[in-house]
Image: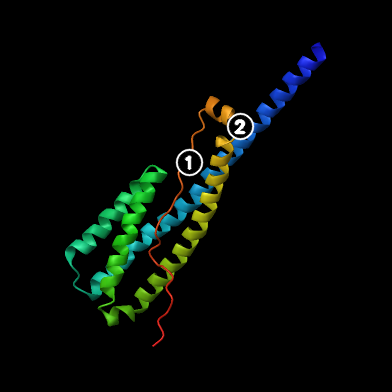
């Protein structure tokens, strides 16, 4: 009888160790994935002032468009949680789209080599953010599924592992179907 009880305790202990390590592993995947997004967002934040300077040199924009863009960029840079970052990024993306819509009125600016290079860089960064976001959300899905599933949810609760938020932002540069005339 003692062997059976010892065997059961051993199996429970082994399961506990494997489940805990799996939760930690997936939690680290989420952190790694967020780091990849953070790097790309910083690249985008660094690009926005150059875009603003290029646009400013070509056109007399409404002052509030420029000021709002700078303010929202700063808000996004200082966000300290995924949820706050997500909200800040949505607002920043909307504002940059407004800026780009105003640029449409200036054909000389759209033909400017610096502006074209900045837009190519922005498109590249947006694509990379999209891939990083997919990876992050996949890691979050796997992590959340594990800590919500029985019996690993007991271990997650015991060690205070919490659900992670998904990162759903609207990209500044959206793919549009070209209009054929």
Q: Nearer the viewer, residue 88 or 11?
A: 11
Tell me the element at label 1.
Answer: loop
Residue at 50 percent across and 52 percent down: it is 36
Q: Is residue 50 left or right of residue 58?
A: right
Badge 1: few (under 14), some or many (20 or more) residues near its Cα, within 10 Å?
Answer: some
Residue at 50 percent across and 28 percent down: it is 160
- Percent of width and height locating residue 94: 31, 61
Tell me the element at label 2.
Answer: helix
Which corner quadrant of the image does residue 21 belong to? top right
Q: Counting residues from the N terminus, which is met first, the one under dot 1 or under dot 2?
A: 2
Whether residue 113 is situated above or below residue 72 in the rendered picture: below
Q: How many marks?
A: 2
Q: Nearer the viewer, residue 151 or 13?
A: 151
Residue at 39 percent across and 45 percent down: it is 83
Label 1, label 2: how many angstroms apart (C-alpha)? 16 Å
Whether residue 43 is situated above or below residue 84 in the rendered picture: below
- Residue on which disc 2 sits: 152
Q: Quadrant of the C terminus?
A: bottom left
Q: Quadrant of the N terminus?
A: top right
Q: Is residue 68 left or right of residue 180?
A: left
Q: Which-is-in-front pick, marks 1 and 2?
A: 2
- Percent of width and height locating residue 174: 41, 68
Note whether residue 45 is visible.
Answer: yes
- Residue on which disc 1 sits: 164
Q: Is residue 28 left or right of residue 5?
A: left
- Percent of width and height locating residue 151: 62, 30
């Amino acid at each position: 009888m003692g062997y059976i009880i010892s065997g059961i305790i051993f199996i429970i202990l082994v399961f506990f160790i494997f489940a805990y390590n799996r939760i930690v592993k997936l939690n680290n995947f989420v952190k790694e994935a967020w780091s990849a997004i953070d790097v790309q967002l910083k690249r985008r934040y660094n690009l926005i002032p150059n875009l603003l300077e290029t646009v400013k040199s070509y056109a007399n924009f409404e002052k509030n468009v420029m000021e709002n863009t700078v303010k929202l960029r700063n808000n996004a840079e200082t966000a300290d949680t995924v949820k706050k970052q997500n909200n800040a990024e949505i607002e920043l993306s909307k504002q940059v789209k407004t800026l780009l819509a105003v640029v449409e009125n200036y054909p000389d600016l759209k033909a400017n080599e610096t502006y074209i290079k900045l837009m190519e860089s922005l498109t590249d960064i947006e694509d990379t953010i999209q891939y990083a976001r997919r990876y992050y959300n996949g890691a979050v899905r796997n992590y959340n599924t594990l800590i919500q599933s029985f019996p690993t949810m007991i271990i997650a609760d015991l060690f205070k592992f919490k659900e992670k938020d998904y990162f759903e932002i609207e990209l500044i540069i959206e793919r549009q179907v070209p209009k054929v005339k």
